[in-house]
Amino acid sequence: MISSASADQHIEEKSMKTLALVLFAVLFLVGSVGATADQENDAKELVQKAVQFFSEKGKDYALKVVGTSNGPFRKDGGLYVFAFALVGTGLAHPYNRNLLSPQWNLQDVKGKYFIRDFVAVAKEKGSGWSDYYWNKPGETKPVLKKTYIMRVPGEEILLGCGYYVE
């Protein structure tokens, strides 16, 4: 037979374990939100710097720099800037040369024409966010990706930088 004190101690231990698990979950979620906010800010900042670079250095040189895998428009965590013409043709990508061609009809796994969405954001708003599903490098299951898009002033070019939302 279990004494009342022993039962109370068992309940208290179980409550403490439950509380510890809840606190861990909350801290994990808060940390994840912070990481996403940092990635969002970093992506936007990289695109803004690249747009400034275009105005300072000119389109041709800027496209070469954006297209280099070790250039200044990339950051740890898989962030990098890419460029598309407003007709949907890839102009510069530091890692995926297959995108350097007409991509107007490129769809994600859910059927979204995301290059068309990039162009619409650039033309209609000048800048903003687009969401779509894309594979992380080395993985086969598409993941939600948020990409910041900004039109280069005076050019028929958009720049973008995205991050995976897990």
Image (cartoon, rainbow, N blue to C red):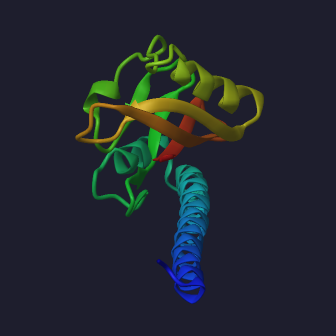
Task: Locate residue 166, reporting x and y percent.
Answer: 47, 47
Q: Residue at x 56, y 58 (%)?
A: 36
Q: Residue at x 40, y 16 (%)?
A: 102
- Decide: is 61 above or below 11: above
Q: Quadrant of residue 64?
A: top left
Q: Quadrant of residue 95?
A: top left
- Decide: is 38 above or below 103: below
Q: Residue at x 68, y 30 (%)?
A: 121
Q: Residue at x 58, y 34 (%)?
A: 131
The number of numbered discs placed on residues in the rendered structure image is 0
| Left or right of residue 44: residue 70 | left
| Left or right of residue 128: residue 101 | left
| Left or right of residue 136: residue 3 | right
- Decide: is 28 above or below 158: below
Nearer-the-camera pick, 30 or 165: 30
Task: Locate residue 9, reporting x and y percent.
Answer: 55, 85
Nearer-the-camera pick, 41 or 25: 25
Task: Locate residue 82, reporting x and y percent.
Answer: 44, 41
Task: Locate residue 148, reporting x and y percent.
Answer: 60, 44
- Decide: is 62 above or below 115: below
Nearer-the-camera pick, 129 or 4: 4
